[in-house]
Every structure is written in structure tokens, then in C-alpha cells.
Amino acid sequence: MRIECAGLTDTGCVRETNEDAFLVDCGSGLFLVADGMGGLEGGEVASRMAIETLAGKLGAVAARLCPDQNQDQALTHAQSLERKMVLAFKEANARIRCFALQGPGTLGMGTTLVALARCGDFCVLGNVGDSRAYLITDQGIRQISEDHSLVMAQVREGLLTPEQAWLSREKSFIYRALGMDSRLEVDTWIIPAAPGDVFLLCSDGLSNVLDDQDIKALVLQAQTDAVQDICARFIALALKRRARDNVTVVLARCLP
């Protein structure tokens, strides 16, 4: 199975700087999106450090661990990659916390991070924060990751509806991010992948202005188009809707 991939980022309609960072590496099958926050320049530094750490720890490992092989071998190697991904997240967290102590411009800096790594016919996903990972197929769209935000925690507890969360002014408040705490919990998943599947990673600058149906429609209406062109349409639509935050989107489409 091959992967066609692309990514784009934009400052958005309000911000003067872009604190998002991303990585697209079709060769190793590694895809990352980080959304930085805090300090004078801390957010930009934190997101870049997260991307650099994960790329350094997982780029070559993913390619080496996960050649095309039978299903049982691929799953075993995907589980190994999942453990290595968690360790890489934790190393990025420690690096960011150490760098933040150099302040004052970096005090309180942190970043979200969502990562996708291909392993044979599986994809390994890791997430901290409210940047998102979606899986889009002919059957529909599914948000794989869970937002570590206060409003989405209230949705999971039944205190808010998804519609109320979408409209809430507090939806950008997150309770888990790299750099926030020395003890980091990382959510992970191992997802079977098949030709035709499209994985989308994005910062909340995109998901705050495009809902699931918008995302599904843009992907499924352009199944034969280059993924770079689809990414450009995502950015254009987010800007048309006056995105107030930085906007980043990464697409990985599975091919036969």
C-alpha cells in the first residue's frame, strides 16, 4: 500500500505570527501537526521542538520497523512503534519544559501534538491536546482523536451537547499539552488502513471553522484530485470563514 500526502499551513485572518508546525514525510510514513502556545515566542518554539523531536525519534524507526509484511507481523511492529511514539512524546515534553525555564519569553510555553505513523497496513496515532486526527472513507468520517479541552470533557460527561461545545467561547481552553506537566499522558490508537482511506490531521484553527460534514465533503468530492490541491481548498475555506487562529492541515491518502 502506498501513501499520497501533503500539508499546508496559514497564519489565519487575525494572528500576526504562525505558531503551528507540521511534518509530512511520505518516505517514512510519518505525519505530524503541532499548535504552539504561551510566552512571547514560546508557542512557535514549542511546536517546532515537538516536530523536531518526533521526527528525530520516529522518522527512521517507522520506516525500519514497518516494511510491507503479513498482518500479524505488521500488528506486532505497530505495537512496538506505538510504545516508541509514547516515549518520543514524553521526550518532547521534557525538552519543552527544560527550555521554558530559560524564560521569561518562553515561560508557560507548550504545544498540542497529533502524530500519525504508517506501519504496514496499520497506522499508529498519538495525540495530546486539541489538534485532531480524522479518518475519512466512503462510509463517512470519524474523529479518531479526543480533544483534551474543557468543553469536550464536558461533552463526554454529558454536561454539554456537541453543538453547545462548538459555540462555546471556552473551547480553546485545554487541560493537556506538551510542556504543561512533567507527567504526560498520551492517547494512542492502532488503526487498520485500506486503499481509499484518507487520514486528516489539523490544528484547531481548521476544526473551529469547519465541522465534520465540511471536512468529509471536501475530501470525498475530490477523490481523484491531488492531495496538495485538497489541502489548499481546506485553507481557502477556513480563510473564507475568517479563521481567527493559525490553520494547518495534513492529508495522507492510502493508495493500492
Image (cartoon, rainbow, N blue to C red):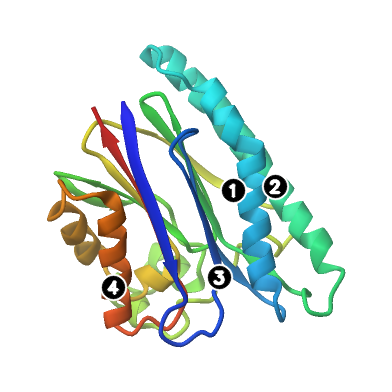
Q: Who's the residue at 54% across and 76% down the image?
A: 173
Q: Which residue is mark 4?
A: 236
Q: CA distance from mark 4 to mark 2?
A: 34 Å
The label nearer to you, 2 versus 1, is: 2
Q: Amino acid at mark 2?
A: Lys
Label 3 with label 1: CB-CB less than 8 Å: no
Q: CA distance from mark 4 to mark 1?
A: 32 Å
Q: Which residue is mark 3?
A: 174
Residue 239 left/right relative to 176: left
Q: CA distance from mark 3 to mark 2?
A: 18 Å
Label 2 with label 1: CB-CB less than 8 Å: yes
Quadrant of the rendered structure where residue 205 is?
bottom left
Q: Who's the residue at 74% across and 74% down the image?
A: 108
Q: Secondary structure at mark 4?
A: helix
Q: CA distance from mark 3 to mark 1?
A: 14 Å
Q: Which residue is mark 1?
A: 186
Local crowd at mark 3 within 10 Å, few (<14), some, or many (≥20)? some
